[in-house]
Image (cartoon, rainbow, N blue to C red):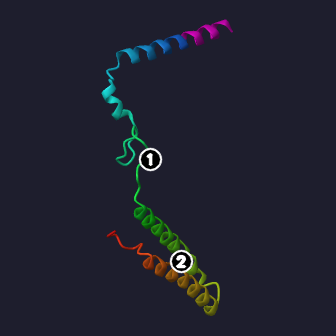
Amino acid sequence: MNLMFYFSLLIIFISNIMMFLSVILSKKTFMDREKCSPFECGFDPNSSARIPFSLHFFLITVIFLIFDVEIALIFPIISLFKLVNFYIWTKISFFFFIILIIGLYHEWNQNMLNWSK
């Protein structure tokens, strides 16, 4: 049991010496701080995180997500065609596309689809 204790102390001592030597012998300077910082899409991580963000870009992103979810919802409607009769499938599809067309009309009416602002 004592032998295991001495070996663990020796391992801790050697690892501490190696870490201390690596800190002393490393050639890092204050100027290398940028290389060690995370890169976040061109944003400087050392500056303020509260920079102005384009609201129009955010709205375009939300529109993209909505229409991306729309595509994910159209696939089950296509597979539903084999399971239910044609009248129910037409009714469901028509209702779904009417909701999408109303949403597209609202976005068009609010000028969210224009990039030139």
Front residue of 54/3: it is 54
Gap in angstroms between the C-alphas marked 2 and 1 = 38 Å
Q: Earlier in the sequence, mark 2 or mark 1?
A: 1
> In the rendered structure, which segment of residues is drawn in magenta?
1-10
With 34 as the anchor, is 87 left or right in this view? right
Amino acid type, callout 2: Ile
Q: Which residue is mark 1?
A: 50
Q: Is residue 5 magenta?
A: yes
Image: 20 above or below 49: above
Type of secondary structure dominating the magenta stretch? helix
**Residue 7 placement (x, y as % from top left):** 58, 10
Query: In the figure, residue 37 lies in which quadrant?
Result: top left
**Secondary structure beneath label 1:** loop
How crowded pointer 2 is (Cα within 10 Å; few <14, some 14-19, many 20+) is rated as some
**Secondary structure beneath label 2:** helix
**Residue 83 placement (x, y as % from top left):** 64, 84
